[in-house]
Structure formats: structure tokens, C-alpha cells
Image (spheres, rainbow, N blue to C red):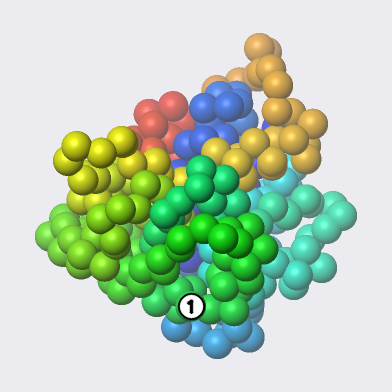
Amino acid sequence: MKIALMDSGIGLLAAAAAVRRLRPDADLVLSSDPDGMPWGPRTPEDLTERALAVAEAAAEHHPDALIVACNTASVHSLPALRAALEPGIPVIGTVPAIKPAAAGGGPVAIWATPATTGSPYQRGLIDDFAHGVDVTEVPCPGLADAVQYADEQAIDETIAAAAALTPPEVRAVVLGCTHYELVAERIRAAVQQPGVPPLVLHGSAGAVAAQALRRTGALAGTDAGAAAPGLTVLLSGREEQLPPAALAYAEGRLLAAVSPAL
């Protein structure tokens, strides 16, 4: 079995690691676009063109499913990606985990890129799934880029800036960009207030990984006779190794240790 994941950058590592934990025998194809990132400032048409190129590069490796491990691409490009690849390859999008966060009653903060914060898409999710819950939208300029390049100082500064915009009474934070899941514990440490219940973080990686395996009928069990799982890394269509910045995160190290790049 083979699962492909796509993103502008290394934000796909969280979902890829979640797939690997659920199905250690699965081959993975990681397709990203370092030549074209960041995708957020692009027009929807330009972004969709880049996303289609990244998806088609992954599709050439004949995966059983494709995870769009990018909130921005899921917002703007999911219909085009599904039109291009389905029904041959199921395409699973990423949606911020606003519904489960709001189910806890709030108050909730949604950390997202400036392009997503306040967008009709995010406001629609809030209206649909968080009606009556106190929700604060927190823009996080520069955080995804800082995570992409494993810039420790920039990560600290951008998390601190977003934490300063997060009301102290918040009890749950939605990680509305897949890159943020790679620094989830640093976000928790910055937002957690002393003397209150532990902050709950809501990412999307586990849910999209499970949905992809569900769509392939492979959520349960492993293939005991399978060879060592493979890892194919595509950087703007080129087969390469995991970028060095990926190894700064536990998810990247897990993937590199379990399955050498092909």
C-alpha cells in the first residue's frame, strides 16, 4: 500500500508520521513545492496550478490515496485536485479541527496564516461548527516560514507574538496550518497559563491520516509480508532526500529512521 501526501513545504510531515504510526508497512510519497512556496500569497488560480503540478508528480508514483496536507490548498484547490485524480486516486483534504475544539465548549483560539484568518472559508467553519462558542482568530505571520526553515529564533518570536494575541482564558487552540503541528508543544508552552487546566491543542494530522487509510480499506492491520516501507521525496517534482530542516522535527526523524529515502 502507498499513500502520497502533498503540501507547499514540510507541513506534510505531521500527517505522514501519523500514517506511518497507523500503518508502519505503508510506502509514502511526500510531494512538496519548495520552488513555489509560500502558497498563501498566491492567487487562487496560481495556487491551484502549483498544487496540481505537485499532485500530478505524486500521482506518477501510483499511490492508493493522496492527502492534501495543506489548509490553503484544501481551501482553494480541492475541487480541481479531485477532478484531476478521482476516482482513480482518492483525494483527502485538510480542514481545521474547529468542530472538535468547539465541542469542548471553549473559549477557543484558531491559529492560522494571515491569508486564512478572517477568510470566508474559516468564518464559515466557525459559523457551522462553533455557534455560541467564544472563538478568537489569531493570525500568525511568519510562523509557517519559520517552521519550514527550522529557524529557531523566528519560531520563538512568531509563537510569542501569536501567544500575545491569544486571550488568557482560552482552553483550546486549533492549529490551522499543518506546519504548526510540528511545533505544537512549543505553542502549548507559550499559551498555557499557570494554575488552569491543561491547554488542548487540535491538529488535523491524525484525522486525515485515518481518513486516507479508511478510503483505501487499510486502516486496520499491517502486511506482515511487506518489504521495508519506502519513502519517496519529491521537491517540486524532483526526487531528492528529505530536506535538512525536516530532520529538526520528531516527525521528520521518525520518517527518516524507519524508511530510507529512495
Residue at image location 58% in from the left, 27% down from the top: 22
Residue at image location 46% in from the left, 61% down from the top: 134
Question: In the picture, which quadrant includes the N terminus?
Answer: top right
Q: Tell me the SS state at disc 1.
A: loop
Quick one: 8 or 184, which is closer to the camera?
184
Residue 116: where, in percent of width, then height? Answer: 48, 74
Is residue 80 visible in the rendered image? The answer is: yes
- Left or right for 73, reference 219: left
User: Farthest residue in the left direction?
Assistant: 153
Q: Amino acid at mark 1?
A: Gly
Residue at image location 24% in from the left, 60% down from the top: 163
Quick one: 126 or 212, which is closer to the camera?
126
- Left or right for 4, reference 168: right
Whether residue 217 is situated above or below residue 52 in the rendered picture: above
Q: Residue 38 occupies which quadrant of the picture? A: bottom left
Residue 255: where, in percent of width, then height? Answer: 43, 35
Q: Residue 145 occupies which quadrant of the picture? A: bottom left
| Residue at which label 1 appears | 118
Is residue 240 visible in the rendered image? The answer is: no
User: Farthest residue in the front direction?
Assistant: 132
